[in-house]
Amino acid sequence: MAKTPLGTTKKTGEKCPESGVWESQSSPSTTIPLSKGETFPPYNGKAVIWKLISYA
């Protein structure tokens, strides 16, 4: 099965399609390790867009 491409974006509340490091597209930004199937969390109390920046 093909990996989810780097640069893929998902929103808070969606399920993670690929284990790896995800970066929030917000200011300030942060990175989180997330496993496939986990739910993307909010950041700083807000819904944000998360971008896959590296594989686990």
Image (tube, grey):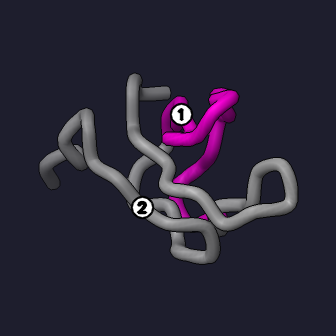
Give the x, y percent position of residue 10: 42, 61
Label 2 vs label 1: CA separation?
10 Å
* Left or right: where 3 falls relative to 14: left
Q: Amino acid at mark 1?
A: Glu
Q: What SS does tag 1 mark? A: strand
Residue 23, percent from left and from top: 53, 33
Residue under the point 59% across and 58% down: 48
In the drawing, what numbered circle is on residue 2? none
- Residue 20 in percent (x, y) is at 50, 34
Residue 25, magenta (yes or no): yes
Res. 23 mark: 1
Q: Nearer the viewer, residue 28 or 49?
A: 28
Give the magenta range: 20-38
Q: Earlier in the sequence, mark 2 or mark 1?
A: 2
**Amino acid marked by disc 2:** Lys
Instruction: Give the SS element for disc 2.
Output: strand
Name the quadrant containing residue 53: top left
In the depicted view, which residue is nearer to us: 52 or 38?
Answer: 52
Residue pictured at 40% horizontal, 23% vertical: 54
- For the residues labelled 2 and 1, say whether their Cβ atoms are less than 8 Å apart: no
- Position of 49 with respect to 51 (left or right) is right
Residue at 53% x, 30% y: name it: 21
Which quadrant holds the N terminus? bottom left
Name the residue tied to disc 2: 10
Frontmost residue, 19 versus 50: 50
Q: How many marks?
A: 2
- Which residue is outermost to the left? 2
Q: Residue at x 53, y 75 (%)?
A: 14
